[in-house]
Amino acid sequence: MRSIISIFLLISCVSCFGSFSEGEKYFRQADYEKAISEFTRTLFLNVNDIKSLHLRARSYEELEEFDKAVEDYKTIIH
């Protein structure tokens, strides 16, 4: 029973983590809010994922949220 609960929790939590390819798809479709959300979930597991940080920053730029874009760019160069 315990292993069934563990498997269920693992499967439930997998959706909490994003995927770069899904975020990139949203970015290319100009759905920048969804792209930001997906990249943010991706960065939860790997805070230094340069590709996700870059496309999230670009998404912020497209939405004219320049302060947030600058924060991501600073993370990239440090």
Image (tube, rainbow, N blue to C red):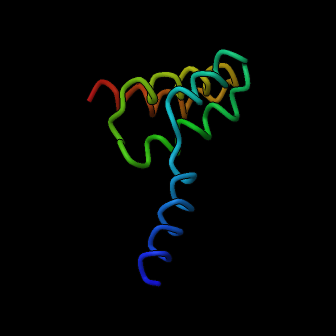
Q: Which residue appears farthest toward the left when viewing the image?
A: 78
Image coords of residue 74 (percent x, y): 37, 29
Residue at image point 69% right, 35% down: 34
User: Image quadrant of residue 6?
Assistant: bottom left
Number of marks: 0
Q: Is residue 15 above or below residue 5?
A: above
Residue appearing at x 32%, y 36% in the figure: 48
Locate residue 26, reporting x and y percent.
67, 25
**Residue positioned 46% across, 29% down in the render:** 52
Q: Nearer the viewer, residue 29 or 7?
A: 7
Q: Position of residue 3 (x, y in %)?
A: 42, 76
Q: Is residue 57 left or right of residue 43?
A: right
Seen as rendered, the residue at the extreme top is: 28
Please tell me which residue lies in front, 76 or 31: 31
Above or below residue 72? Residue 41 is: below
Which of the image's four quarters has the C terminus? top left
Task: Residue 7: give x, y in percent of width and height.
Answer: 47, 67
Horizontally, residue 54 falls left or right of residue 16, namely left
Residue 2's quadrant in the figure?
A: bottom left
For image coordinates 36% across by 42% down, the residue present is: 47
